[in-house]
Image (tube, grey):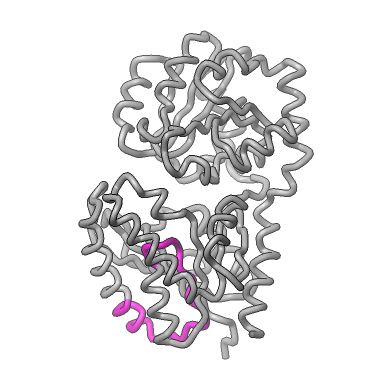
Amino acid sequence: MDNKKKILMILDNAFYPDLRVQKEINSLIKLGFDVELICWDQEGELPEIEREANFIIHRIKIIAGKQQGIKKIFDLFKFFRKGINKIKSLNTSFDFFYIHDFLMLPLGVYLKFKNKKPLIYDAHEIYHLMEWEKYPPFLSKIIFFVEKKLIKFADEIIVVNEKRKEFYSGYIKNKDIHIIGNWYDPYDGEVISLREKYSIPEDGVLISYFGVINFDERPVDTIINSLIKNKNIHFFIAGVGKHEKLISEMSSNNERIHYLGWQKNIRKYMHDIDFIIYYLNDKRKYFEYTAPNTLYLALSHNIPLITNVPGEAKELIQKYNTGYFINNLEELKSKIDFDVKSNTYIDKLKGISTIKDQFKWSENEKKYSQIFNSLIHS
């Protein structure tokens, strides 16, 4: 008889995969749990059922256009209805319901009370701030109100950094809020040399941006246009988004700009990267709460980060000299030494080496063990 505790995860994207969720599932399976995943396929392009090595993905296909705003609520309720039916059809008694992000929280609360089982809420984002541009102000306020009411029913709450913990602690009392960072273990997979593939000379400096391609939110285009005048700099961009066509055109018009498209495993391209860029529009409401995956990727691959993002990224740079914190594009040109053989650069590599082991994903497994042991014995 299988005595493993069973976890049902519910996710608001199609799991392409979602790298954070993938790591979470792997860790929970390693700790001895069975995991099944139900997710919302909003593009309808992936298989409805997909069997990974050690878990099953169930995708519910409800097509939802991008930038729908308030109209997305109707699709969300369709997902709830189909999701509940899908869960019934699995005919499985789950021991825990693990919900990712705000949109899935109402469904999680319903499942908790219907099945009388614990609910784990993993808030990857502070949704009403992250998505404030998509909704009218009154709706953002309603979203925040609903989250504040429903989150009280979660048995365990997970966030990704200290800044967000401080935010939620402002209105959640008498509950622990756990930090599970977007960290990475050392990489031992396939490696592709960008320097060799693109015949970049030895004195060429490789700068990367990997992430959402939306110049309104992340003005990587202005950064490229500013730095590409330096004849030794080569840019590598990967990701998809609103302005991927424009970035592709920039790549076509300049042999030192390379657009890699969307990559399932971006880590295989990081061996030759000299700097990683993570630069946000500082007028966005979410600016101070961001917890960039790029920060932790940079640490795990020994690459200095260039960023304007406050919070942990700024703190690590200032305390341990792990990269460059800049306030504006002028500092991008005046403050950064792009000579990778300089003592300045070498000192930043040393700074990364002193702290990188603190940000291994395996450290999060200890936290998961504590969270679920507490639930099992409560």
Residue at the spot 43% in from the left edge and 32% down from the top edge? 281
Regarding residue 56, the answer to whether it shows in the image is no
Residue 187, picture quadrant: top right
Residue beneath the point at 77% across and 25% down: 347
Q: Position of residue 18 (x, y in %)?
A: 46, 54
Q: Quadrant of residue 140?
A: bottom left
- Looking at the figure, which quarter contains the C terminus? bottom right
Q: Residue at x 67, y 71 (%)?
A: 369
Most foreground residue, 55 or 81: 81
In the depicted structure, whether residue 88 falls above or below residue 316? below
Residue 237 location (% of width, % of height) = 45, 30
Magenta segment range? 84-104
Q: Position of residue 368 (x, y in %)?
A: 64, 67
Instruction: Please state the horizontal and vertical placement of residue 228, each as a whole percent of the image.
Output: 47, 14
102 part of magenta stretch:
yes
Q: Residue at x 32, y 32 (%)?
A: 243
Looking at the image, residue 119 lies above or below residue 298: below
Q: Nearer the viewer, residue 363 or 285?
A: 285
Q: Residue furthest bottom?
A: 1
